[in-house]
Amino acid sequence: WLKRLAYQLPAMVASLPRPLPLSHRRIRLLRRFTLKRKRQPQQILVPASTPSQVEKAVPSPALQPHVAAIAAELTETARRNVALEAVRIGNYYSEDQAEVLRYIAEQHAELLQDSKWLKKYAAKLRKENGLTQRYNSSEILAKRHEADGYDVFVHADEAVAAKERADSAKSGNKPSWEEMDPALLGELQDGLLEAAAAAQGEADPVGADELVELLEGCARAGEIAAAVFCGERIEAVHEGGVPDELVDRLFEALKPLLRPSAVRAQPVLTGPWSETAPGKVGAPNPRKGLGRVLDKLIRKRRERELAQGGQAAQKAEQTAQGEEILQRLC
């Protein structure tokens, strides 16, 4: 019977159903799934559910040496934008957040190795946005911005604006900056660019009166950085100091910007104030510039009132102290 079985075995095997041929895509997916299971998991912490806990759970994804070398050639802003893109394409809902973070880290490494993608979007990757100014690469890969309430699937600036609207609606506070007509914003933008070109010696000088009007328009629109730029240009035009007749006018225009609700979250006016200075990371903080300009105006007002003497000087001293306290609190 063994001889008979050996004789019939080839026919029995030939009669068995054959498996369907695998396509190239199925072969790649199967190979990727197999490699993924064999790959050792990276030491990535699970992001916490609250922002305070996330600060203690920032991951440190271990990049391969050649991938780390590619990342080192990018600017800090570009690395953060690559991390944002990795979260956007790699994030998904799962109860196992550690697995989600591992997949995001894989997408991050693949993006860094995709030379065509890096070259195509090089200009966009170098641009700052609301999230790259708030988080570093490790915090982004840990999805800290998602834990803070930002939408990771939309553009960064849209996510910041949406969160600001949601926070304002929740607190009942409405933005106090003026929603200008696009034509007026265009005129402001043209005037600012002309003033910036004049500051660099590439255009005719801009008069002080025009700079004051630009400052007042930027302040009403909530454009704090552009308003500070105008204030600094006014100081540069008046080498001996801002005239007394302009001190009160400039102070009253800039003072509302101390309130966060009076500042536009996502500026629309661009210029030198929105660019990264050489040797530094990120655009300068406009609130620091606002503090410097207001401080000079306060001192100028105090000197003027003290020169008048008497009760006016005492009142000016008390007012100046109150304004300094308000400036520190805001």
Image (cartoon, helix red, strand yellow):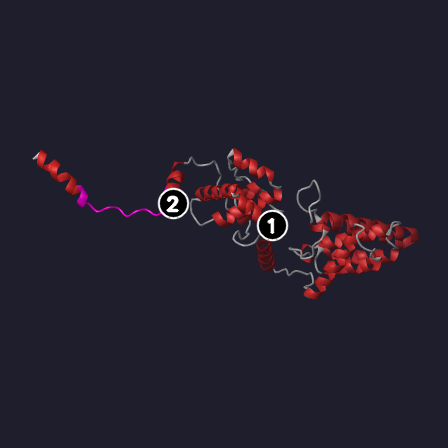
* Left or right relative to 205: residue 84: left
Q: Position of residue 288 (x, y in %)?
A: 73, 47
Residue 64 falls left or right of residue 268: left
Mark before the other along the chain sequence, 2 or 1: 2
Q: Which mark is residue 159?
A: none
Residue 83 visible at all:
no
Residue 220: x, y in percent? 73, 61
**Residue at position x 38%, y 44% from top?**
28
Judging by the rendered image, the residue that carries numbered circle 2 is 29
Residue 17: within the magenta?
A: yes
Q: Residue at x 66, y 42 (%)?
A: 281
Q: Which residue is mark 1?
A: 124
Callout 2 secondary element: helix
**Residue name at image x 79 percent, y 58 percent:** 252
Q: How many marks?
A: 2
Can you give x and y, in whole percent of width and height, for residue 228 in the image? 75, 52
In this rendering, position of residue 20 left or right of residue 194: left
Label 1 sits on what residue type? Lys
User: Magenta segment range?
Assistant: 13-30
Q: Secondary structure at mark 1?
A: helix
